[in-house]
Image (tube, helix red, strand yellow):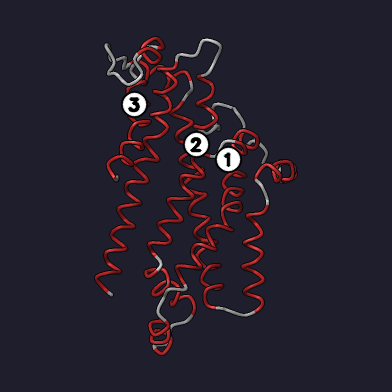
Amino acid sequence: MSWLYALLLAAPLYYLAVSAFKTNIEIFTRPFALPRHWLWHNFSTAWQTAALGQALLDSLLISVVAVALTLVLAVPAAYALARQDGRLARLVAGAFSAGFLIPPFAALIPTVVLAIKLDLFYTREFQMLFLPASALPLSVLLLVQFMRTVPRALVESASLDGAGNLRLLVSVFVPVSLPGIVSVTILQLLTFWNEYLFSLTITGTAPQIRTVQVALPTLVSDATDFGVLTAGTVLTLLPVYFAYSLASRRMQEALTAGAVKG
């Protein structure tokens, strides 16, 4: 059964990879066959036509800064909520939960107005600030669940040694909750990298500031070369794939370390 599941996951990736080297005719007539002629120039055409080099740098910059800001805000907030169980803590947790009730498109117009008022419309800086704000509800609630698994005895022992809140957070809660922090990092990195609606509306379509998700549709036209389009898609997937591989390996190491310590 696991092999069937793996096949279902691998088939679309294989189709995407082989299509990047084909002509339109081959893509539609021989979808899963290997290319008769490997069209490596599809990648250079996609790179130049959509200006993917600059777009990749913009997406990388925005995603990395947004993830860092998300963690800087979410980790202390989750620590505070995990340590408290009073009415105020439940009220704050409920406020974070309410963030899930607001659909993203409902916040589009207020967000645009805010960007204009701050004179940050069509800038990367506003996108870097907006994305963490949109990611906080899920990030905080996930981290709270991980931080509540920290053994009470470990916290009491550190407190008896004179550890304050900052030391408890850095030396106890963060190491124990590291798998959760890595999970949130992976989740939000994928979300920020694939974000399209607000990137198109707020950051804009100018080649010097647009993200890869905005740049990629420029390869679509009335006479779309689907080989070039899939080649561009592959190029935009590679950075996030490598980041996911490194982060997931780090999460496995953290889980293994926790199991050994236990």
**Distance in Å between CA atoms under marks 2 and 3:** 24 Å
The three-letter code of the residue at mark 3 reads Ala
Mark linked to residue 17:
3
Q: Quadrant of the C terminus?
A: bottom left
Q: State the image quarter where residue 158 is shown.
A: bottom left
Q: Earlier in the sequence, mark 1 or mark 2?
A: 2
Q: Which residue has dot 2 on it?
A: 58
Query: Residue placed at 63% from the left, 54% from the top?
Result: 100
Compared across the picture, whether 99 is left or right of 250 comes to right
Compared across the picture, whether 245 is left or right of 162 comes to left
- At label 1, counting other C-alpha atoms closer than 10 Å, the crowd grade (few under 14, some 14-19, many 20 or more) is many
- 63, above or below 153, in the image: above
The three-letter code of the residue at mark 2 reads Asp
x then y, percent, for residue 47:
42, 22
Query: Residue placed at 45% from the left, 35% from the top?
Result: 57
Compared across the picture, whether 124 is left or right of 185 comes to right
SS label for mark 1: helix
Q: Earlier in the sequence, mark 2 or mark 3?
A: 3
x then y, percent, for residue 136:
57, 57
